[in-house]
Image (tube, coloured by chain):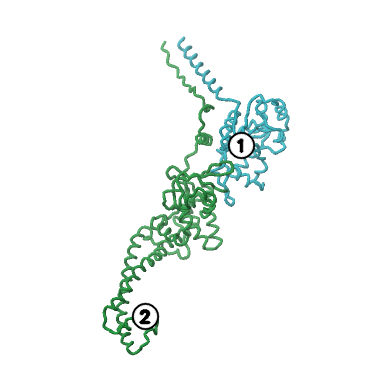
Chain colours: A green, B cyan
Amino acid sequence: MKSTKPKISFDPTPQRPSVDQPFDREAWEKQLNEPKIAKAPLRRVVVEPIPKAPQFEATGLMAGPRPAYLPRNTRQLALSSGVALTVFLGLASAMFWINDDRSAASESNASLLVSDGLSTGSQPLDENTTRAASSDLTDVSTTFAVSVSRAPAPKDLPAVVLASLQSKTVLEPKLQMLKESVLAGSYQVEIYSLKGHDRVRLRFEDEVVTSEDAVDLAVEDLMQTRPGLVNALRTPSGMIDKDTLIFSLVRSALMSDQNVEASTAAREMSRKVFSVSPARSDNLGSVRLYTVKPGDSLAYISLQFYGLPDAYSRIIEANRDTLQSPDMIQLGQRLIIPS
Amino acid sequence: MSKRAAFFAAGLAVYATAVQAEGQSISAKVEFMFDGAKVAIAPMAVEASRHAALFAALDPSCDPYCIAPELAAPGIETLIEPDVLAFLEKGVGTNAGLLVDARMPHDRDLGFIPGSVSLPVDTVSPQSKFRRDILKALGVRVFEDVFNFADAQSLVVYDNGPTQNDAGRLIGYLLDAGYPSEKIRYYRGGMQVWSVLGLTIQE
């Protein structure tokens, strides 16, 4: 008789962890909280479905066709407008100079008749007056000196004009678009993984503002108006936390509208992000501690725990002893989260 | 034939060691820190029989007489005593979880499991004005009327035992508030089974 090997398989290892084993709390908690019924991994949290229309319905000033060149050709646009502006200003100053010379000539002739050269008081005339004051009307060196003294002005001017022009032409329409998206409810709150840590961000149909140029512009803009917020947006690696920057910009744009509809939409945005916030803190009796993770900023942490990106001052206040400066949070740093 | 018998015997032996190994890992004796003090639970408590009689004699909380279901709610795991002891040691003892007594104060006064916190079921009902503060105390983050459960504590909920359903109601209220089901467990045996096993009871 040929006996077949009985298939006895038995796992003698006990299912429960031995009491003597060193206790790994995190592993235990993970095992404890693991859902018994396997769920499909849910990565993206869709809080509100996007309305059926493929793109949001723009109203008011935005009703016109969307400028398609904006997102892609920002750099070229900025560059070409810079070049155009420089050329224009150069031409204008040259024209001015020529005009000046002409008027200077006529003026100096006139000054022969009118002894009081300060009559008009405007700057070019003042310069002419000085020139007119010189005894020799054909003295070229004075003319030259005047023109040199004028030269630096157009040099600084384009930079300033360009910056304001860029923020007007590039940033504001984008913000306006995002604002309209939020008002129409056509955005998602998304959980994504950054270096193994879950984060939450807003996701728009149009990824216009997420372009690097726009972020740089927005940061430059904020530096002027709210330097504190820019500091609070710094991540441990010194970068700007883009997710929270966009959230902040859209939120303040909505709040500045000062109507019920806009502020309700802004609150709804906060509530959606807050309800799915994956940030976890440790409960040490009376104190809550949060460990700083890659990509975090004080404004982001504030949004996770208080629903508002601007409430970071509470965290700064509570961690005054350990924070070197408000714009210096370090990876792995433990921050007290006051409740 | 003898070969088969030998295999059978070997199988039995393996089975016996496995049972023994499993038996060893379940100890009815645990010690842990709770609220800054050392708490010890051991079998053969002095007043065990008095407590057992007391909890057995309690009127059932529903009329006509009913028995609590096996599961408090879909997706909620039901625990037995060794699980509760392990939870006390490794969950409650490390601030990672709470053993929740769902009974109203007059029931809790009869005695409770050491290391448990009192969370009377009616204080968490949707009508209760304490609900928000209680959820906060459980680690839930609150913004306006939105709750975030990322930091919420792991809970094991119990009551008098199978003749009462305070625990089931409390679990229902918590789930209604949005508490994640994987963070709640149900100890169905409650005080009735706990006292019959002679485990330590605090008064």
Image quadrant where residue A164 sits: bottom left
Residue position for label 1: B36
- Looking at the rendered structure, the secondary structure element under dot 1 is loop
Q: Are marks 2 and 1 in contact (CB under 8 Å)?
A: no
Question: Mark 2 Cα within 10 Å, few/some/many (few <14, many 20+)?
Answer: some
Callout 1: chain: B
Residue A64 on image: x %, y %: 43, 64
Q: Residue at x 52, y 57 (%)?
A: A266
Residue under the image location 48 percent in, 21 percent down: A10
Q: Is B200 on the left-hand or right-hand side of A284?
A: right
Label 2 – label 1 distance at C-alpha: 83 Å
SS at badge 2: helix
Q: Are marks 2 and 1 on the same chain?
A: no
Q: Name the residue that disc number 2 marks.
A: A126
The reply to whether residue A278 is visible in this rendering is: no
Query: Is residue A214 left or right of B152 when viewed as pictured?
Result: left
The answer to whether A250 is drawn above or below residue B36 in the figure is below
Residue A210 — which label?
Answer: none
- Give B162 or A84, whichever is nearer the viewer: A84
Q: Position of residue B124 (x, y in %)?
A: 65, 43
Mark yes or no: residue B144 visible.
Answer: yes
